[in-house]
Amino acid sequence: MPRTITTDDTRQQYDAHGEGGGIGEYLLHRAKPHLPPWLAGAGAGLASLPAHYFWSGEPGVTAGLTLVSVALTGLTWWAGKSTTQQRRLHSAVTVAAASSWFTAAAIAGPGAGPLGELYFIGAPALALSWNIRQILRKNVEGPAAGADGGFLEKVGLAKTQVIRTEVGPNKAAFDLQLPRGELTSTDVSKNLERIAGALDVPKTAVRMTEDPESASRVTLTVVPLDLLKNTVPCPGPSHPGGSIAAPVHVGIYEDGTPAVIYFPGDPKAGRNAAHFLVMGMTGSGKSEGGLTALAEVVTRRDVIVWASDPAKAEQTLGPLLPAIDWAALDMPSTKAMIEALKAAIPVRTAWLAKYGYKQWEPACAETQADGSPGMPYLIGWFEEAAKAIREIDDDVFTGISQEARSAGVSLVISMQRASGNQVSTDTRASLGSSWVHGVRSEGDARFALDDEVLDAGAAPHVWKDKKPGYSYLVANGVNDALWATPLRDYLTGVDYLNWAVINFADIRASIDPTTAGVAARTVDRAFTARTRYPIPGTTDQPETTMLNGYGPDEDEENGYYPDEDDYDMRPPYGADQDDDYEEGELIDAEQELPEVEQVVQLAARPPADEPRPKISTAEARAAMEEVLEEFEEEGRDVVGPADFMAYCDRYGRGRSWVSGQVAQFVLAGRLAETSEVGRYRIVPYEVAA
């Protein structure tokens, strides 16, 4: 039968000697820790014999030994000042008695007078006194209570030992050894509020970190003073002109460590691309934190931003709008942006696969080996996303959040409360990373923070809206030991935001043909005619996006429909400016015109008595169908918007509307793209159906 081990003492003996150890070996093992005082006493008695033989009758040696005895006693007393008073006194008495006896024995002989009796009585007594101290020191309950003054027992952690202490200027960390089988880290987390009360500090000042290698050990961290109470101005771009793959600095932790987030993944670091849920009640500083992050993003060279705010429009995003590729500030454009994002994911993924990338990396934004333009990283940022979810569907972001990472896209959803009736559980599970500001209740905090983070001491519900800018960051690339550590977002004023927009305009990436093409084909003019806001100081009016050097109307009138292969990346010029643009120069609109020298009649004016026909939109669409059928009956295979232009007056519609109907024919399958720009092949009804 295998031997049963029932005590710690027997287990130590078993580990040291195995099953074959006998009683003698066990007793020797138990006696070893107590032998040093006895060996020291025996050594002093034996050493006195040769000392008396060589030094007896030497006056100088007698004086020397006396001085050494006094010096050793004084040195022992001085060296023991850092120990307890009892240990210091015990050590000094032991050294004084032993050195005095040795001096007398060396001079007169160990057996002279009472020296022999003193040795055989005093040496065992001193050795036993040290053995008693050693035995009492092993009493767990006694020292534990004495070390912390009974504090741990008062807060429900009786029998817990403090095995290591690290104290800084405003931070103290204690490694606790919990009694095995009696307490766990859960018991510590439940008592954090009691510990904070006993220490007279805020609840958020006490946090707990579990030891990944032992369930019976935890680290308790106490930060007595709130060093984040003063606002922290943004120190400037952390990586100006760098890649979006570098960390984005958003704030500072209470110990001065910068708080960073990552958007793209990094296979070398084992980090996936990140989606974020940004949450916080009104007044918590959630939107200001988002502006801080976006202000960092727009200083990078290889990223574009699509941002939406259908609730506050320009109120939040206003200063950064000139640096945003697509700003959706109403509900229709927000819906179009979501559809464009969905359509862009498979196209961008196919592009990455074509050039051999497993996921987006900085090299993707550079010109590829075959001369093709690169593809910047894409961040879809949705402020006040609750409105979009409420008016579309609570699962509207689920597909994007599940699939976008592999396409070089990060999704950011910012809202006040990510409750179950606003955001589906599938969407919350796919977002992965959370940036949580003050919330109204602990229940609200659980929508964004895991239980283990809250158990470790995170408490955004304590702040509510009383501490704007305070937040917790639980994200890919962030050390999990910092998940429950408060940080404060940097404060970015309007002047700083304008500075970032203006000074990095030249290095900021433009949208790539792949993403632009699929967005144009998916949502048409919602993307191609999106408003582009001017860089501050350049013009007073927003501009509209241009394709191939034309304004939106001019593009359609000339038979152009956007395609990913021919999307022009030239700087946008407004449609009104295009009339004055010729051979790279602008004509002064206020310059006086020359006098008229000759009038040339180009065409007869239409009779004034022929009014333009007025028909409904449905009738006009039906008429367009009839015209397409006429083209088909005439045997035409290929047509374009220009072929329909002659019928504009017949329908009572403008050229832009006619061009838009041609685009609808393409989406409906009645027309198919050809290799020639602006020309489309007619698809018979049977095939289109």
Image (cartoon, helix red, strand yellow):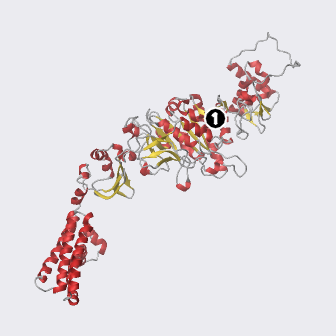
All told, the count of numbered labels is: 1
Please identify the quarter of the rendering in which residue 215 is found: bottom left
The quarter of the image holding the C terminus is top right
- Compared to 372, does 604 lie above or below? above
- Compared to 502, does 113 lie above or below? below
> Residue 627 location, x and y as percent?
77, 24
Q: Which residue is mark 1?
A: 535
Identify the element where label 1 is drawn: loop
- Compared to 592, does 512 lie above or below? below
Q: Can I make out residue 561 in this image?
A: yes
> Residue 527 location, x and y as percent?
65, 33
Circle 1: is it few (<14), some (14-19), or many (20+) Cα within 10 Å?
some
Amino acid type at mark 1: Ile
> Residue 219 location, x and y as percent?
35, 54
Compared across the picture, whether 220 is left or right of 158 comes to right
> Residue 638 location, x and y as percent?
79, 33
